[in-house]
Amino acid sequence: MDFLELAKARYSCKKFASTPIEKEKLEKILEAGRLAPTAKNNQPQHIYVLSSQESLALADKITPCRYGAPTVLAVAHDTTNVFEYPGGAYDSGAEDAAIVATHIVLAAKDVGLDTCWLNFFDPDKAKEILNLPDNEALTILIDVGYPDESAKPLPNHESRKPLSETVTYR
Ligand SMILES: Cc1cc2nc3c(=O)[nH]c(=O)nc-3n(C[C@H](O)[C@H](O)[C@H](O)COP(=O)(O)O)c2cc1C
């Protein structure tokens, strides 16, 4: 698929079939995440694949937005291995995780899977529930799976601001 077609075809799926994801497809999308760029190539990401019944039950404690997905990817990052912006007020951790997650979401569509990017959760509580190490922060969850037969994009999927509103040539 042409890249723009792929970008248009991706949508936030809010109803998944229970069909498990094939190992090869899961590995392919994780590989797409591995290839993502990160600041200074620090690669601070740590992705937890939640697909056992126990892990999915934990995901359901963290967020109401699993939508029946058979797999949830929790994209954490090592807070001690991030690039600190000059000035010291910001770091690249969540940014690096977001690039990894974007690769994953688009690669998933490329292999016929749908996704929903989630931030409707309390990162500190999620960290506790998943028993993450102290040095990790969790900012992104991604539901992944095959869409339910009735799944379709919400109307706002077609609604994007024109470039004239979001781009300024100077
Ligand atoms: C950073 C981010 C956080 C999001 N968090 C949630 C969420 O917690 N729950 C949810 O149902 N959708 C979530 N979404 C999906 C957005 O609502 C959706 O991407 C947006 O409405 C555009 O629709 P589309 O993805 O179908 O094009 C999130 C998307 C992004 C990019």
Image: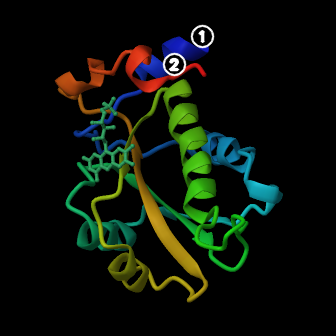
**Amino acid at the residue labelled 1:** Asp
Q: Number of numbered discs present?
A: 2
Mark 1 Cβ inside 8 Å of ligand 1: no
- Which corner quadrant of the image does residue 170 belong to? top right
Q: Residues within 10 Å of mark 2 (few under 14, many from 20)?
A: some
**Amino acid at the residue labelled 2:** Leu
What is the distance, in whole Å, between disc 2 and disc 1 at their CAs? 6 Å
- Is 118 on the left-hand or right-hand side of 5? left
Circle 2 — which element?
helix
Name the residue at 63% across, 67% down.
Answer: 91
The answer to whether 163 is drawn above or below residue 107 in the figure is above
The answer to whether 76 is drawn above or below residue 33 in the figure is below
Quadrant showing the N terminus? top right
**Mark 2, residue position:** 6
The answer to whether 136 is drawn above or below residue 121 in the figure is below
What percent of the width, then of the height, locates residue 148?
Answer: 25, 33
- Is 43 on the left-hand or right-hand side of 152? right
**Mark 1, residue position:** 2
Name the residue at 41% across, 66% down.
Answer: 52
What percent of the width, then of the height, locates residue 111?
Answer: 55, 28
Mark 2–mark 1 CB contact (< 8 Å): yes
The answer to whether 77 is drawn above or below residue 153 in the figure is below
- Is 134 on the left-hand or right-hand side of 17? right
What percent of the width, then of the height, locates residue 100?
Answer: 62, 49
Circle 1 — which element?
loop
What percent of the width, then of the height, locates residue 140?
Answer: 45, 59
Q: Residues within 10 Å of mark 1 (few under 14, many from 20)?
A: few
Q: In this view, which residue lies farthest toward the front?
A: 170
Front residue of 57/139: it is 139
Front residue of 36/64: it is 36
Q: In this view, which residue lies farthest toward the bottom?
A: 134
Image quarter where ligand 1 lies: top left
